[in-house]
Amino acid sequence: MKFSEFSAAAIPKLELQMESIISLSKQDWDDSLLGMLRYHLGWGENDHAKSSKGKRIRPLILLLATETAGGDWENALPAAASIELIHNFSLIHDDIEDKSAYRRGRQTLWKLHDLPLAINAGDAMYALSFISLGELIKTHSSEVAFQAYKLISHACLALTKGQHLDISFEKAGKISVQQYLEMIKGKTAALLAISTKLGSLLANADQQTQEYYYKLGKNIGLAFQIHDDILGIW
């Protein structure tokens, strides 16, 4: 199956998984908060702009890793949704920290709703990611679900380290290649590495195979970030 065919089959089910997780909290939340989350995820239903979803690359890679490692990718959907929600939580906060007014051709949450509400929406997105992850227990053992929690938690810590270094380097003047590489390990590479490893874990791959998948995701992430940073120079 081509990646485009796999993507066409997987993305609608991924969107449904994320929709279901967000809908679980609908009765407890204010409609404006739900609207903010939906807007950021590209499901906008207001006057600010037309729908603009991301590429969903990270969850797709997780699902593909599960499939190639011999598992059922549909059973990995809760983890894929969790990864995408973590990614979007980080983008909400990243836009605030970078003072970015636009993302994907639309105004960012903090520009539309101001800083306090945008920070709070990012926090909600973070919590929802773990609610989604908890649904793994329906199709996987408690040990596998626990390992998934650990992997996602460590990925979040890596993201905060990478962002800390990124912000700190803005005032550092000159940094070494090694410092730069250490920083970008906590950017795209952090989530892609966990996506591939987690995908193989959910296929019940052995530890050595999981490490191979981890290295694959990390290297893809590093290459992507370097390419993106080079484009950003011009």
Image (cartoon, rainbow, N blue to C red):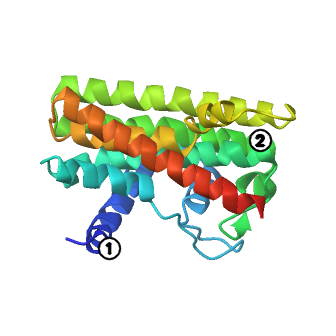
- Element class at badge 2: helix
Left or right, 215 with reference to 56? left
Quadrant assignment for the N terminus = bottom left
Locate the C terminus by quadrant. bottom right
For the residues labelled 1 and 2, the Cα–Cα distance comes to 34 Å
Q: As shown in the figure, which amino acid type bears the numbered disc 2?
A: Glu
Query: Could you say which is closer to the camera, residue 218 or residue 77?
Result: 218
Q: Report the residue marked by disc 2.
A: 97
Name the residue nearer the viewer: 87 or 214.
214
Q: Which residue position holds label 1?
A: 4
Residue at the image point whose x is 77% and y is 40% from the top: 116
Q: Residues within 10 Å of mark 2 (few under 14, many from 20)?
A: few
Residue at horizontal 45%, vertical 27%? 153
Residue 80 screen position, x and y as percent? 35, 48
Q: Secondary structure at mark 1?
A: helix
| Relative side of 6 to 108, left or right | left
Which residue extends farthest front?
177
Where is residue 39? Give x, y as percent.
60, 62
Q: Quadrant of residue 96?
A: top right
The circle on residue 226 is: none
